[in-house]
């Protein structure tokens, strides 16, 4: 079996389970650990895998926390877009330090929150200014959680995933530059 497929399944399930565990211990709204896995896998494995990983990780997460529904389609698709954006960032830049990872996580979080806010706003015909005001506290939580989780865990995930995927194929890994 292809190493990327094996890694994909492991990363997707790990993202969903870790997010569910964080929720189980009483994390505030929008604090979950999906972003470090989706960001890492997108950067290291590419846009196709990044998209599918984001989609599956979010869908599994909703299932694990007992909250799947029609919204799962939209939130999963939005995390799929995050996976593609992470992959594109990975193609533009090969060395990442923790500050850059934090900035990328913040950018991707804002993209995700904007997509989901916009889709739900259109569906429920909520005025845009009301959406923005209502979204602010959730986005703040989401930004803090995602940036902290990414700064702490992405370097380790990136190193492990690069090691696993480049055993047979050297020269294609994305490097983490400590700093």
Image (cartoon, grey):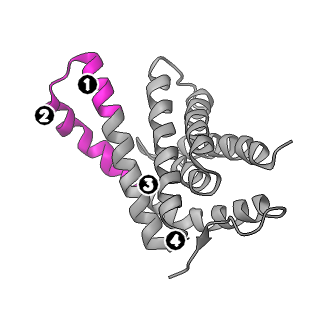
Magenta stretch, main secondary structure, is helix
Q: Position of residue 33 (x, y in %)?
A: 54, 49
Image vertical order of residue 69 relative to residue 1, above or below = above
Residue 145 - label:
3
Distance, label 2 to label 1, CA atoms, is 10 Å
Q: Which residue is mark 1?
A: 121
Residue at image position (62%, 40%) is 16
Magenta range: 116-144
Does residue 165 appear to the left or right of 46 in the view shown? right
- Answer few, some or many: residues within 10 Å of disc 3's Cα (few below 14, many 20 plus, some between 14 and 19): many
User: Which residue was labeled with disc 2?
Assistant: 129
Please report contact status of discs 2 and 3: CB closer than 8 Å, yes or no. no
Quarter location, residue 120 = top left
Please, is residue 171 above or below residue 2 in the view?
below
Count of numbered tags: 4
Question: Residue tagged by mark 4?
Answer: 96
Q: On the rendered structure, is 72 left or right of 46?
A: left
* Nearer-the-camera pick, 133 or 104: 104
């Amino acid at each position: 079996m292809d190493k990327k497929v094996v890694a994909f399944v492991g990363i997707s399930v790990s993202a969903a389970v870790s997010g569910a565990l964080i929720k189980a211990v009483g994390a505030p709204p929008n604090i979950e650990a999906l972003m470090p896995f989706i960001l890492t896998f997108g950067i290291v494995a590419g846009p196709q895998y990044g998209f599918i990983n984001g989609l599956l990780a979010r869908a599994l997460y909703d299932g694990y926390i007992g909250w799947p529904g029609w919204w799962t389609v939209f939130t999963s698709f939005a995390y799929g877009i995050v996976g593609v954006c992470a992959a594109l960032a990975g193609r533009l830049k090969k060395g990442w330090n923790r500050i850059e990872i934090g900035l990328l996580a913040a950018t991707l979080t804002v993209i995700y929150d904007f997509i989901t806010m916009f889709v739900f706003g259109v569906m429920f015909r909520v005025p845009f200014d009301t959406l923005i005001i209502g979204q602010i506290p959730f986005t703040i939580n989401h930004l803090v959680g995602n940036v902290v989780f990414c700064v702490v865990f992405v370097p380790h995930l990136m190193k492990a995933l690069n090691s696993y995927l480049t055993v047979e194929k050297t020269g294609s890994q994305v490097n983490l530059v400590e700093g």
